[in-house]
Image: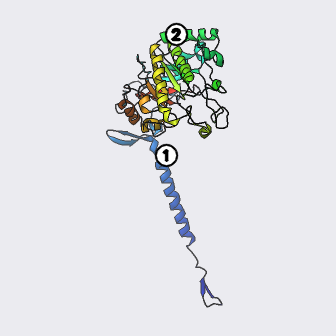
């Protein structure tokens, strides 16, 4: 109904609405449509498709055994036929890749010294479907996993005991005889044992010894003593039987308060690339003399752009090595990265990918650096 208000306008308060019969009909139709939709959706899993088209096969129309098992025995006199599986696509079980003599392809996992000394390597390789191992031989704190013969290693307190080193060397030789490809992981210039030593590390503008954002000291690549020591580590590891020496943090530091480092002849950015290139040449020679190859961990930008002004790494210096390792972004183009490396002069399979999963069917090297994954 309408009522006049004091301003002369009218308001409409509505009529009677639909009758109860119409409401009931609408509800019944809605319930029926909903039931039909649910029924069609529920029967989708019983549709079977073949070359003759699709048909509905309901579970209660299939023969079952009296025991209620999933498979039934055919009744006497009934002819059964094998199902047509010609169009079924199955996933093949991944097969371990055979390690090549030069380690140009493979799948590697990091092992601990306990794994190595307690005989747990074979099970770990089988579990990861891998053929190669990575063993940390120099940690960020500077500690070596073996007994070095270099005087500086003794001065830094970096060497392991002779008994531990002997046991480790024998285990490495045993793995090598089994055909396992062996990679020594070396945290290179990041070395806290060098912290506090004027002739080895960086100085700050305040007169202190510089450390990175993890409060870890670094050896200064500009200093000959540092380069000679690390080159010696590479040579000793190659002589122990490792097939490849992987250098991590193999350049000037890129993280932390770099602006606090005292610049000058011992930290001159215009000489970074030359110093790192010189070190790679010497370290690669030491590895080669011991029968191993030298590899280095870098980042995608260095390979893509050709240089890294902070670390001193260049594509040219990397291309002189046996392999380049990197952690890839989710959308990384491994084909393009490999092409950049091969065009720069590396071998057929120059790219190693540090990952927490191993992918089958990939031509590049892969490595799991966390055995708990």
Residue bearing mark 2 = 173
Q: Depth check: 106 or 252 in front?
A: 252
Mark before the other along the chain sequence, 2 or 1: 1
Q: Depth check: 191 or 81 in front?
A: 191
How far apart are the alpha carbons under marks 2 and 1? 62 Å
- In this picture, residue 111 sits left or right of residue 52: right
The tag on residue 42 is 1
The quadrant in which the N terminus is found is bottom right
Q: Depth check: 120 or 261 in front?
A: 261
Outermost residue on the left side: it is 52
The quadrant in which the C terminus is found is top right
**Mark 2 burial class by Cα count in 10 Å: few <14, some 14-19, many 20+:** some
| Residue 319 is at least partly visible in this image | yes
> Mark 2: which secondary structure?
helix
Q: Residue at x 45, y 44 (%)?
A: 44
Q: Measured from the top left, where is residue 59 in percent x and y? A: 47, 38
Q: Residue at x 51, y 55 (%)?
A: 34
- In this picture, residue 120 sits left or right of residue 323: right
Q: Measured from the top left, where is residue 129 in percent x and y? A: 48, 22
Quadrant of the rendered image containing residue 13: bottom right
Quadrant of the rendered image containing residue 291: top left
Indicate whether 280 appears above or below 331. above
């Amino acid at each position: 109904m309408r009522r006049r208000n004091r301003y002369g306008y009218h308001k409409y308060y509505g009529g009677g609405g639909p009758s109860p019969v119409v409401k009931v009909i609408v509800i019944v139709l809605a319930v029926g449509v909903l039931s039909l939709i649910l029924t069609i959706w529920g029967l989708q899993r019983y549709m079977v498709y073949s070359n003759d088209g699709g048909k509905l096969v309901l579970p209660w129309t299939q023969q079952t055994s009296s025991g209620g098992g999933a498979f039934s025995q055919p009744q006497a006199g009934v002819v059964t036929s094998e199902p047509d599986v010609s169009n079924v696509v199955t996933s093949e079980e991944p097969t371990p890749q055979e390690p090549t003599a030069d380690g140009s392809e493979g799948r590697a996992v990091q092992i601990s010294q306990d794994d190595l000394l307690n005989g747990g390597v074979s099970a770990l390789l089988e579990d990861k479907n891998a053929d190669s191992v990575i063993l940390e031989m120099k940690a960020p704190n500077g500690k070596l996993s073996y007994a070095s013969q270099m005087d500086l290693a003794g001065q830094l307190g970096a060497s392991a005991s002779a008994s531990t080193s002997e046991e480790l060397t024998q285990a490495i030789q045993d793995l090598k005889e089994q055909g396992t490809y062996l990679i020594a992981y070396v945290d290179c210039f990041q070395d806290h044992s060098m912290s506090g030593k004027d002739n080895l590390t960086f100085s700050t503008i305040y007169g202190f010894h510089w450390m990175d954002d993890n409060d870890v000291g670094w050896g200064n690549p500009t200093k000959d003593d540092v380069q000679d020591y690390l080159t010696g580590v590479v040579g000793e590891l190659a002589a122990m039987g490792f097939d490849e020496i992987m250098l991590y943090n193999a350049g000037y530091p890129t993280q932390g308060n770099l602006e606090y480092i005292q610049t000058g002849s011992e930290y001159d950015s215009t000489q970074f690339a030359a110093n790192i290139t010189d070190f790679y040449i010497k370290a690669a020679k030491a590895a080669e003399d011991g029968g191993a190859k030298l590899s280095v961990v870098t980042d995608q930008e260095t390979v893509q752009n050709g240089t890294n002004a902070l670390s001193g790494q260049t594509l040219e210096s990397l291309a002189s090595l046996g392999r380049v390792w990197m952690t890839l972004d989710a959308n990384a183009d491994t084909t393009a990265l490999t092409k950049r490396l091969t065009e720069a002069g590396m071998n057929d399979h120059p790219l190693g990918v540090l990952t927490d999963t191993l992918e089958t069917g990939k031509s590049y090297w892969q490595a799991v650096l966390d055995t708990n994954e």
